[in-house]
Amino acid sequence: MTAMSEAMKKPETSIKLTERQLRARRARSIAIAVSLGVLVVLFYIVTLVKGPAVLVRPL
Amino acid sequence: MSITLAPAEPSIAGVGDYVALMKPRVMSLVVFTAFVGLVIAPGHLHPVIGLTALLCIAVGAGAAGTLNMWYDADIDARMARTAARPIPAGRLAPGEALAFGLTLAGFSVVVLGLLVNLIAAALLALTIAFYVVVYTMWLKRTTPQNIVIGGAAGALPPIIGWAAATGTVAIEPVLLFLIIFFWTPPHFWALSLYRAEDYARAGVPMLPVVAGEAETRRQILLYTLLLAPLGVAPWLVGYAGPLYGIVAVATGAALVALALRVRAERRGYAASKQMFAFSILYLFLLFAMLLVDRLPGGLVGHFAV
């Protein structure tokens, strides 16, 4: 028997997510993706609106 | 010596729990008052920049609410009104709320600074810091003046709105600041009158807990007597038209009448509950009238593309 197959027989130690935890994680991931998308679109539109003035940043 | 940490349980927090952390009802009032500050400011603002400013102010308010719930989770767990919030209910770990709040705070301030202007961003950062550090961490648990001084954080949004539109701070939005500042104590003390047991159980030194009901009712009347003329002031100094003046005088008189009923109330809290509910309507009407005042060509013309 190889070392690899020995390792594969070891008991599972990683955390197994429940159905509820998986659903919650998926919903959170989608929300983060949507937020990042909104941020990208926002920066894009404001750059279009401001034009070259977007680089002018007086204190 | 070694310390064994139990592995953190994977989160079951849903998107709704994170939304609840941001106190959406408070956020809506913040956005509304900031919008009024933005609209009454002189000059023209591109609608996209105006919307960006409001989005950042909303997220900043959400950050402040989130960090407040993170710090006050122990208090919230002991109060019936707040026990179902995501952290005390066990749906969301404190660390998750802290990380979420700090992320929102950082993004809202940086984006406002990059896309709108630095004065507005600095004011938003000040507002978040004041609400979280000065009010939540310091005043709330130590003095019955907590909501009086802490109310400054809730009163700043019109000034942020004005700064977003003009890049400066002026005296006009300071009047709006003062209206919200003097509105906050009678509004929250009316609530605390019939929630005093909750606050006492949580160890929060609200005025009815520390000074008693009679003194709280007296203070509500005193602050309302200061608030009513302040509410009329924008009309008296010429920032608003007669329609605003009529509404401010009528609703201010109604608020004073309610405060007198609260002062005279001996049994039950019917007048206090009415005072709490009407004070929300009062503030909404004043700011809505400021908007209506700008309507004839003003509101549309203000957001010139």
Image: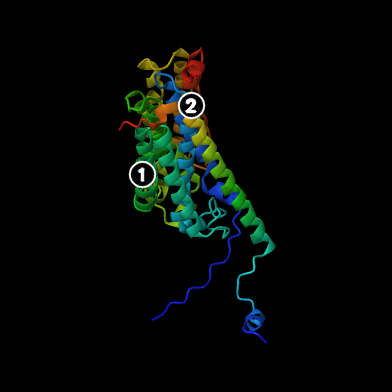
Q: Please state the chain letter of the residue tagged with numbered disc 1 in the rendered image.
A: B
Disc 2 crowd, CA 10 A, few/some/many (<14, 14-19, 20+): some
Q: Is residue B27 above or below residue B137?
A: above
Label 1 SS = helix
Dot 2 falls on a residue whose secondary structure is helix
Q: Give how far across and how far down residue B292 sits, in percent.
A: 51, 18
Residue B203 coordinates in the image, percent (x, y)? 42, 56
B164 left or right of B272 in image:
left
Which quadrant holds residue B131? top left
Which residue is under mark 2? A49
Residue sticking out furthest to the bottom: A1
**Position of B226 relative to B149 (above/below):** above
Residue A13 vs residue B12, the one in the foreground: A13
Which residue is most to the right? Answer: A19
Q: Where does label 1 land, which residue?
A: B130
* Residue drawn at point x = 47 percent, y = 31 percent: A47
- The Cα–Cα distance between marks 2 and 1, rounded to whole angstroms, is 33 Å
Residue that appears at 64% across and 69% down = A16
In-front residue for pair B90/B208: B90
Please state which amino acid type lies under the numbered disc 2.
Val
